[in-house]
Amino acid sequence: MDKVLRDLIDHIQFTENVAAKIHGVLDEGQIYRTVTEEFVQSERSLAGILLLVEDGLSLKVAQVSLSSDVVKTLEEAAASPIEEFRTELSESSALAQVIKEGTTLQVTSNDISEAILPESLASQVMGIMEMGGEPSIVTPLSRQGEIIGILMVMAPKLAEHFIPSVRNLAQHISAALDLADERVERKLAEDALQQSEEKFRAIVENAPDQFVIVQRDGIISFVNYVEPGVTLDDIIGASVYDYVVPELADIYRQTQNRVFETGKPERIEVLSIMERTFDCRIAPLEDNDQIEHLMVILTDITDRKLAEEALRQSETRYRQLFDSAPDGVFILDEDGYIVECSNSTMLIYGYSKEEMINKRITEFMHPSSAASLSQGFPQEQPFEGEIRIVRSDGSIVYLWRKGIPLKDADGNLTGVLAYDRDITDRKRAEELLQRHRQRLENVVKERTSSLEEANTALRVMLKTADQIKTEIEETVLFNVKSFALPYLDELKKCSLDDRQKSYIEMLQNSLDQVTEPFLQGVSAQSLTLTPTEVTIMNLIKQGKATKEIASLLNMSIRTVETHRYNIRTKLGLKNKAVNLRTYVSSRE
């Protein structure tokens, strides 16, 4: 057989064997490696696979049938991995034609090497491989109908005879890539379906809701779980209508029938015979465009319904308390606008609710109070104080306001709850009491002034009376001393019988009794005091010092001291350690 023909037959068998080995390979990289490894082992020719980069303007080396030593030499010479070798389509018209037109061309090995490598490096590589201008075949590789790269095969001789087999190998590679994609997509779809089924099963089996599949006649064919004390055998095959309270069974039946007829899901609330309330969602299950089953999803909302009822009752009580509170109650938002107000608030302010809602609270306040409230509003802390408002009729009303800040779960201020108590009557009473108190204070001041004047006059009168009394005492004492005592002394010198002496003694005692109040405890022997001595003794009794007495009586201090000595002698205090003033005062 002719050698050329034999080589052609061998090459065709070789490419078919390569095609058979890549059939069923699911990994793209493995397909390329299998092709090039077969070329390395056959030592027939050099093959390589070039792939388009993302921008579509250049090709990169994916695989090449070179030994590891040659690849290492190339990488060292290029100072980069072989995977980073690039060829711009704009620099190779042959490769650009293959990509753009999808044709198979015959070129030289130099064309291929120079397209992939720099010119100097290309010549070195061709020298290492002992190749020159040998013919090469380049044919497109496609994937899902799109050209993705080039298969190149260097044939030593008669390359044109090998073109069909090379093109056939490229088609097998493209088919293997498509088959791998299909298998990958199918595997992904199968995995996704399996995961979806597992996920659905996990959701259904672990869902807090109850999933029930119901037939047209209402018979239950599936349920994901049952309540404790009930078995699946009790539920499967039973009628769904048996579990709805009789008064709602017809409504539930009509709803299910509508879903069967319209194919549109519906939602109702049902009360079960166990006195549990369920949110019931009914959806059609189609099979070959026919609806023979329904999916009924039951959510137990008994606790929520009880909570809603408790909340409704709480809101009702709150509204009753809110509207019946004697104080004005209103809620402000964070900007000071009225959100809600009670009936008492409207009575206090004189406006309807419609006139107050969505108005700033400061619009109803007296300017002075509005200015004080607006500073630092809204308040972050509770506050209270007296304010004034202007009613709808223009009258001024005094209020005692207490504000409580409203905050959300994060502590942010959302508004203010405020209470207004009308204290106008109390303020008027306080003003009236203040005016009455002022009048009383004025009367007291007037009376006090009159009493002070009377006291002053009385003190003057008392002082005058004391002076008159002193003068009378001095006169009486002087008269007794001058006109009575001398004669008694003379009588005592006369010859008197006992009876006469007794009369004289009685007279002496009587004079002592008469003068005793004037002397204020001074014994009768003080009657021997001269008028000047009596005056000085009275001044001593008043607490006057010697110097003061001398000044008052226009005497020398020495003269006053002499009179004091004579007084002590006549009072029997001579050579006694007794204070003269203390002695005289103690006799009062």
Image (cartoon, rainbow, N blue to C red):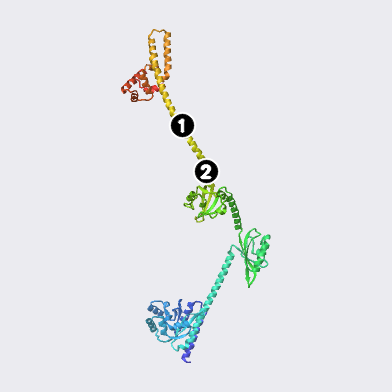
- The residues tagged by marks 2 and 1 sit, at their Cα atoms, a distance apart of 34 Å
Counting from the top left corner in percent of width and height, residue 361 is at 52, 52
| N-terminal-most mark, 2 or 1 | 2
Q: Residues within 10 Å of mark 1 (few under 14, many from 20)?
A: few
Residue 322 against residue 13 in the figure, above or below: above
Residue 572 visible in the current orientation: no
Q: Which residue is mark 2?
A: 427
Residues 313 and 70: in front is: 313
Q: Which mark is residue 450?
A: 1
Q: Kindly identify the residue that appears in the image at 53 percent across and 76 percent down.
A: 183
Q: Is 237 left, or right, of 323 in this rendering?
A: right
Select label 2 or label 1 by which is in front.
1
Residues 578 and 4: in front is: 578
Q: Are marks 2 and 1 in contact (CB under 8 Å)?
A: no
Q: Amino acid at mark 1?
A: Ser
Q: Kindly identify the residue that appears in the image at 48 percent across and 34 percent down.
A: 444
Q: Amino acid at mark 2?
A: Lys
Residues 290 and 358: in front is: 358
